[in-house]
Image (spheres, rainbow, N blue to C red):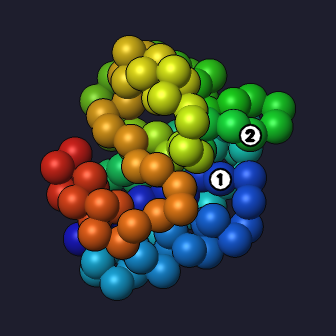
Amino acid sequence: MANILVVDDAKFMRMTLGTILEKGNHKVVGEAEDGHEAIEMFHELQPDLVTMDITMPEVNGLEAVESILSSHPSAKIIMCSAMGQQKMVVEAIERGAKDFIVKPFDETRVLDAIKRVL
């Protein structure tokens, strides 16, 4: 079981991912709506893993990944992207994300990615 911070600007996506994570016996310790909130919550909660949306207002997922990893190089972050965002996914991996999952979420794929990264 892992403590997970879920970051997505869409409440529906946070709820969907939360349901999948709980089915996989993980605990959602926090939810953030944008990268700025994600950075603050990461420092406060020190989760085992972060699921990070790429496209968000204010601070996007790529910027948030860079910021978190600059102060916590061992942070485990999985990017979440919509179809057609391959270029951004590659950039996220280059910046230090450990894996990615594609929306709409497939329960098995999400849980497999988490198992691999942990």
Q: Quadrant of residue 60?
A: top right
Asked whether the residues under the numbered discs 1 and 2 touch, taking CB atoms below 8 Å apart as contact, a structural biologist would say yes
Q: Amino acid at mark 1?
A: Asp
- For residue 69, side relative to residue 73 (left or right): right
- The residue carrying mark 2 is 56
Does residue 68 appear in this view? no
Say which element carries label 2.
loop
In this view, the residue farthest toward the front is 84
Q: Amino acid at mark 2?
A: Met
Point out residue 47 in the picture as x, y percentages from the top left corner: 40, 52
Point out residue 83 in the picture as x, y percentages from the top left corner: 55, 44
Q: Residues within 10 Å of mark 1 (few under 14, many from 20)?
A: many
Task: Answer with mark 1 or mark 2, whichever residue precedes in sequence.
Answer: 1
- For residue 27, side relative to residue 63 (left or right): left
- For residue 30, side relative to residue 20 (left or right): right
Write the residue at 39% across / 67% down: 106
Write the residue at 41% across / 49% down: 101
Write the residue at 30% across / 61% down: 109
User: Could you say which is closer to the camera, residue 36 or residue 44?
Assistant: 36
Q: Quadrant of residue 32?
A: bottom right
Point out residue 62 in the picture as x, y percentages from the top left corner: 58, 25
User: Could you say which is closer to the camera, residue 44 or residue 93?
Assistant: 93
From what the image shows, is residue 29 above or below residue 22?
above
- The residue carrying mark 1 is 8
Point out residue 105 in the picture as x, y percentages from the top left corner: 47, 64
Give the total of numbered labels.
Answer: 2
